[in-house]
Image: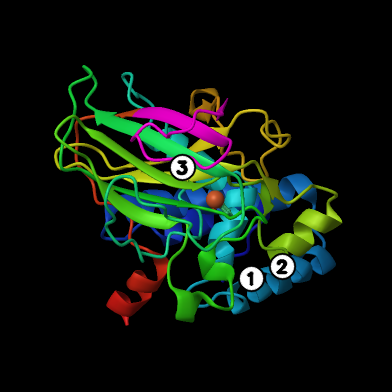
Amino acid sequence: MPQFNDTELTEAVIRSFDNTPDPRAKFLLQELVKSLHDYVRKTDLTFAEWEYAIDFLTRTGQKCTPVRQEFILLSDVMGVSMLVDAVNHRERDGATETTVLGPFYVGEHKAMPHGADISPRLKGEPMFVQSRVTDLAGKPLSSVPVDVWHADNEGFYDSQKSDYETHGPSSRARFITDADGRFFFRTILPCSYPIPTDGPVGEMIIQTRRHPMRPAHVHFLVNAPGYEPLITHVFIDGDKYLDSDVVFGVKNELVAKIEQRTDAAMPDGKPAGGPWHLMTYEFRMKPGKGDAPKPMAAKVTEDA
Ligand code: BEZ
Ligand code: FE
């Protein structure tokens, strides 16, 4: 009957995974054991704290549904999502920086014509977005699907609203780049918003006196064949939460100055009907491959 002191116990648990057939799985599990055991030793974790952690993780799992992923939210607020993003995108070679996908990519993206208003039922300040997709040398990439989505001017995504089933997508669409790599659309200026705080992750944020806010941004998912899928946001310069994003997703290069305009026509020549904002941003794609992420609901359906 082996008996272990606390260091020998760690070694024994690590050895217990020695026969794992997949070498990568073996490495990941053995490193996880090392880090978890170090944490317990370093903190002298009490039974009450261990029970609290088990209960917290249990409630995190119970809060998950096909369209809500509380574990990803936990990963986001602990900075793990951005760290995974960082270690997987170390060499950008001039390509646009990446950031978190977030939980509101729900795969309802319907292709719309350039210039379309993607927020026709929403109150808010009009914004025209003009953009271009190129390779690292600045050569335009045509026929590239670009998914865009953002919150409304009260900080909610369409999928969080009770009328989503009846009204369908809003502030959410797909555009296909033209021969010059360009796409453009009308929408409203999004505002900063809190991550969902009605679950254990929000409870932790509130109890630890952090704020739950994300600075205003528009999400872009650019998926060009032969290039790494680009998952990113463009943040609105001047937002008061740019320095303290609850999910640590801001990068300087992703902050865009939004111009305030009073011209009678928007860049596509159609009437503006009052003051408006202009967002201009170019995306540079890195050669490579990889699958674009699937929305949470699609993953559940496929795996079932
Ligand atoms: C978002 O930007 O949509 C988001 C990202 C991470 C957590 C919550 C929301
Ligand atoms: Fe967002």
Q: Residue at x 43, y 59 (%)?
A: 105
State the separation of the CA atoms marked 2 and 3. 22 Å
Q: Is residue 59 above or below residue 139?
A: below
Indicate the amino acid at tag 2. Answer: Pro
Q: CA distance from mark 3 to mark 1?
A: 20 Å
Q: Is residue 146 above or below residue 1?
A: above
Image coords of residue 20 (percent x, y): 32, 60
Residue highlighted by disc 3: 84
Please report the bounds of the magenta region as a residue range.
259-282
Nearer-the-camera pick, 125 or 67? 125
Q: Which residue is mark 1?
A: 60
Three-letter code, disc 3: Val
Q: Which mark is residue 16?
A: none
Q: How many marks?
A: 3
| Residue type, label 1 | Thr
Name which residue lies at 69% across and 62% down: 201
274 magenta-colored? yes
Whole-number angstrom distance, CA of label 1 to CA of label 2: 6 Å
In x, y percent, where is residue 246?
68, 45
Asked whether disc 1 touches disc 2, contact meaning CB atoms under 8 Å apart, the reply is yes
The chosen color scheme is rainbow
First in sequence: mark 2 or mark 3? 3
Dot placed on the residue nearer the N-terminal end, 1 or 2: 1
Please say whether residue 228 is visible from this viewpoint. yes
* Above-or-below relation of 264 to 5: above
Q: Is residue 155 left or right of residue 132?
A: right
Which element carries disc 2, helix, strand or loop?
helix
Secondary structure at badge 3 equals: helix
Residue 185, image quadrant? top left
